[in-house]
Image: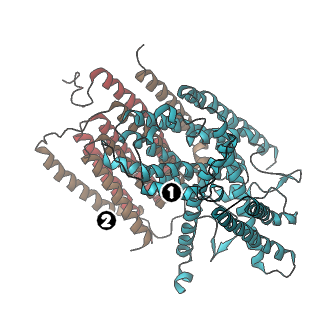
Chain colours: A brown, B cyan, C red
Amino acid sequence: MNLPLIVFFFFALLAVAGAVMLILAREPVHSALSLILVMAALATLYLLLGAEFIAAVQMIVYAGAVMVLFVFVIMLLNMGLEERTNFSKFAYLGVVGGFVLLLEIGHWLFHSPAAAAVVNGAEPVKAFSTVELSKLLFRSYLFPFEATSILILIAILGALALARKEE
Amino acid sequence: MEFISQHPVLVVSIVKIAVLLFVVMTALAYLTWLERKVIAHIQARWGPYYVGAHGLLQPLADGLKFLFKEDITPPVSDRLVYTLAPFLALSLALTAIALIPFGPPSVTLLGQPLFVVSNINIGLIFVFAVTSLGVYGVALAGWSSNSKYPLMGGLRSSAQMISYEVSLTISVVGVLLLAGTLDFNSIIEGQSGYYLHFIPRWHIVPQIVGFMCYLTAAIAETNRIPFDLPEAETELVAGFHTEYSSFKFAMFFMAEYANMITVSCLATILFLGGWLSPFPDSWTWQLFIPGAGLLALGIYCAVDTITTMRGIARLQFGVVTMLCLGGAALTLAPAFAALSSSAPAWIATVNTGVQGIFWFTAKITAILFFYIWMRGTLPRFRYDQLMSFGWKLLLPVSLANLVLTSIVVLYLMMKVPG
Amino acid sequence: MTVPVSYYLVLSAILFGLGVVAFVFKRNVITVFMSVELMLNAVNLAFVAFARAYNQFDGLVFVFFVIVVAAAEAAVGLAIVIMMRRNRESLNVERVNLLKF
């Protein structure tokens, strides 16, 4: 039981708790706050995996801009509480099936020989350097980078055109 | 004692955090004093004068007032979010201060750098990540107050903050291109050296446009005049913190000043050379500057105590005089000791530490004075003017600065062979 | 010494599953959007875990692109939600069913 394992379990539990609160919350603002909690926990897990730049980008872009957009829309549209629905009886069967599926995935991940290449925990983590990442991003992946910038431009124009008030 | 030698990181971190928290809280309190005094003098009046000598106990009185005031909880729609918002704002504002290096990393205690609580490789982006989460404190406070004015103020304030955050980040990328790293200590060390032997190689010299964009965006980001329409008293009652009273309001107040301090620290590190001194290292008389400054302050306080103060104010100001003269003695002693050639090695470390902290604090105080000066002098923007200024003027100027900087850096890189 | 990579993959699977559950069971269209974001986050975690496992940077580049595309999709999706509210006055996914067979 060493420190990285304890930190991992703490933040993993936090992420799962946030996801469960997203499902169980009655107000949309609480769901948004739970999702922000999940994103913060995941950013810490990225730090634990050594991807420091990605953790910072996740916090700035995802938790700091995209979720602000969600929270704004929730506040502006002023929707009420989530209604409680009647469950269909198939839900219970689905839960059992999902649990069995999860157990199978866990078993494959831990015991199958194909996954042995993935399990790696021998040497301490050396962080991914931002300089190498940017070299890869701007040389090998330059075309997708430019394509996503055009995609963002299209998204801005689309959102403007859709949400503009008719005058 | 073996615990201390076996776990140096933990012990030194706890000491640093405790000292930093105390210093930052005191600095916040006395920043409010400085603001009230400076604005008062701009407006040809005195400001706080009677609560303690020259108003120096005014922050203490304000703190006690906030503690003992009645905590009114209006019929809010969401009790959890209403209570969470000021805690979120204050804790995020204080987290960003943990990354700032206040002095050179060569000054160590038990092998750990003494002047920075945590030094990480991505320090710059991490501070931006924390400040971009600060929008939630404002938005959630406005929303959960269940009232028109806070909601309007909260939404406008958060829209303003995320708009100016874009310009803030882009105006810093010019510095990043010159420095080549995200680590604060490396950025500061890249600013050592001199052009023409006496102009320091600080990033403000090539990036003056970036500095002005950064400062403007930072004033907008921290909701200060001229960008404080969402919380102005004459416009929206008090904006997003209308329905908060006593300690929760004090937390918002402290969060705003802590954000101001963070942004000033960032400006100092990125553009003004951090803890580097503006004078070349060969001018050894610069070791006496902190001591001389404190001595001058002590002499002024002594003269004022003897001539104008009366009664208990005289006693209080006498204490202040003693503190200033004591500080002067403490800083002059290592400087004098360094002159003699038989000085032990730790005298040089103490000198480096004192110099570093002095220059860093002096630069932060200059920028904070500029902030307060803006507040006392300028009228405020209307909201649509504010948004159009942010998107239509500041963002294109920051982008132009970025493009120009990258062209120049590329040209210089290609000119150097290999 | 450190955490095995498979632990991260199991966490990613759990979060993805919870995202699917939220997507299926929730009625408010914005909450449904948020469950899509949760699924994308789970996938990001899997990418970063694999990048660490094979010590390659390509996983991180992919995470970068997933974040960017999710942001663009959130912007357009929320604009559609605003239009929905303006035209139909309701944000319940079961009420927007004119094209249902």
Residue nearest the viewer, comparing B222 with B397:
B222
Q: CA distance from mark 2 to mark 1?
A: 60 Å
> Residue C80's spot in the image, x, y percent?
36, 27
Mark 2 or mark 1: which is in front? Answer: 1
Q: Secondary structure at mark 2?
A: helix
Q: Residue reaching furthest left?
A: A89
Residue position marked by numbered label 1 in the rendering: B63
> Residue A163's spot in the image, x, y percent?
41, 23
The disc at residue B161 is none
Residue nearest the viewer, comparing B80 with B200:
B80
Give the side of residue B390 with respect to residue B359, left or right: left
Query: What is the quadrant of the N terminus of chain B in the image?
Result: bottom right
Residue B171 image-quadrant placement: top right
Q: Secondary structure at mark 1?
A: helix
Residue B353 seen in the figure: no
Give the side of residue A139 with respect to residue A144, left or right: right
The 10 Å Cα crowd at callout 1, few under 14, some 14 to 19, many 20 or more, is some
Check disc 2 and give the amino acid type.
His
Give the side of residue B44 with respect to residue B383, left or right: right
Is B290 placed above or below B41 here?
A: below
Check disc 1 and give the amino acid type.
Gly
Is A72 placed above or below A25 here?
A: above
The disc at residue A111 is 2
> Residue A78's spot in the image, x, y percent?
32, 33
Numbered disc 2: what chain?
A
